[in-house]
Image (cartoon, grey):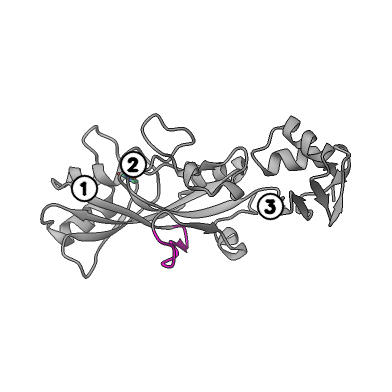
């Protein structure tokens, strides 16, 4: 496996700057494989067992989290407009370069994927891959159901003339709440789809990305790492 310098491994795996890493190394606060190391150029590999001041550091090359996004949080890395999804990552798990793979509106809740792997996010969001995203949408009026589902399936035309790919609309056991599956990610897409049918979305939750459902055990605002199986389902190893 390719080695890299310990200072680079630590700086990439944390929010510490290189100079903070050097200070900690000089102070004997860093252990590699259980032994104190002070040389910034000591060879290391992604995934090595590293501790800083006795706390273990996640040194995986990339991290992938499923966040159950609450309302009022912006899916961006910096917020002029309130807290961001990255602010919800606990300090011990924070590292440089974390970002949400795809946008949810500030008032949309549910599955938000946070990673530092740009290639993975790029593949997941590539329009040609059409990775489905599934939502529960509650609307403020009655739909002519079979007709609305047929219009979604045919490919809706939005108010601005945009022609959408075929999407699925299913009723749920709750009146005026529908399960919607779309294969593209346009701005305010689900809200605009319902608006094209004359109703407004009053609540929106993303409940799945591809074949990976939002973990029902995650409370709003909580996150956990994606499992290896979930990453496989999302094509983490695809070219
Ligand atoms: N569609 C929307 O309208 N909003 C979202 O946040 C996601 C999909």
Q: Look at discs 3 and 2 and give the one toward the viewer.
A: 3
Which secondary structure, mark 2? loop
Residue density around tag 1, few if under 14, some if 14–19, many if 20 or more, within 10 Å: many
* Residue depicted at x 65% and y 54%: 237
The count of marks equals 3
Q: Which residue is mark 3?
A: 58
Q: Is residue 120 above or below residue 78?
A: below
The image position of residue 207, as x and y in percent, is: 38, 59
Q: Measure the alpha-carbon separation of dots 3 and 2.
A: 29 Å
Q: Is residue 85 above or below residue 232?
A: above
Residue ranking furthest to the bottom: 173
Q: Which residue is mark 2?
A: 106
Ligand 1 is in which quadrant of the figure?
Answer: top left
* Residue depicted at x 58% and y 55%: 235
Q: In this orientation, does residue 159 appear?
A: yes
* Image position of 45 (left or right of 129): right
The image position of residue 69, as x and y in percent, is: 40, 51
Which secondary structure, mark 3? loop
The image quadrant of residue 146 is: bottom left
Q: Is residue 66 magenta?
A: no
Q: Which callout, 2 or 1, points at the residue further toward the start of the chain?
A: 2
Q: Which residue is mark 1?
A: 194
Which residue range is magenta in the image?
209-219
Nearer to me, 181 or 37: 37
Nearer to me, 238 or 206: 206
Q: Measure the alpha-carbon separation of dots 2 and 1.
A: 18 Å
* Image position of 76 (left or right of 70): right
Residue density around tag 2, few if under 14, some if 14–19, many if 20 or more, within 10 Å: some
């Amino acid at each position: 496996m390719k080695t890299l310098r310990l200072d680079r491994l630590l700086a990439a795996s944390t929010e510490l700057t290189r100079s903070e890493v050097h200070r900690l190394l000089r102070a004997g606060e860093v252990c590699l494989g259980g032994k104190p190391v002070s040389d910034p150029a000591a060879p290391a590999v992604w995934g090595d067992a590293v501790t800083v001041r006795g706390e273990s550091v996640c040194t995986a090359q990339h991290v992938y989290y499923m966040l159950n996004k609450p309302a009022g949080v912006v899916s961006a890395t910096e917020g002029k407009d309130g807290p961001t999804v990255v602010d919800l990552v606990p300090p011990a798990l924070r590292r440089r370069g974390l970002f949400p793979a795809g946008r949810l509106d500030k008032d949309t809740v549910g599955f938000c994927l946070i990673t530092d792997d740009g290639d993975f996010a790029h593949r997941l969001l590539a329009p040609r891959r059409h990775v489905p995203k599934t939502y529960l949408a509650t609307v403020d009026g009655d739909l002519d159901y079979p007709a609305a589902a047929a219009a979604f399936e045919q490919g809706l035309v939005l108010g601005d003339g945009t022609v959408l790919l075929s999407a699925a609309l299913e009723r749920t056991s709750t009146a005026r709440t529908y399960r919607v599956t779309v294969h593209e990610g346009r701005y305010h897409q689900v809200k605009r789809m319902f608006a094209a049918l004359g109703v407004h979305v009053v609540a929106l939750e993303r409940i799945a990305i591809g074949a990976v459902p939002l973990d029902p055990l995650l409370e709003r605002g909580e996150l956990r790492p994606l499992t290896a199986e979930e990453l496989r389902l999302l094509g983490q190893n695809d070219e």
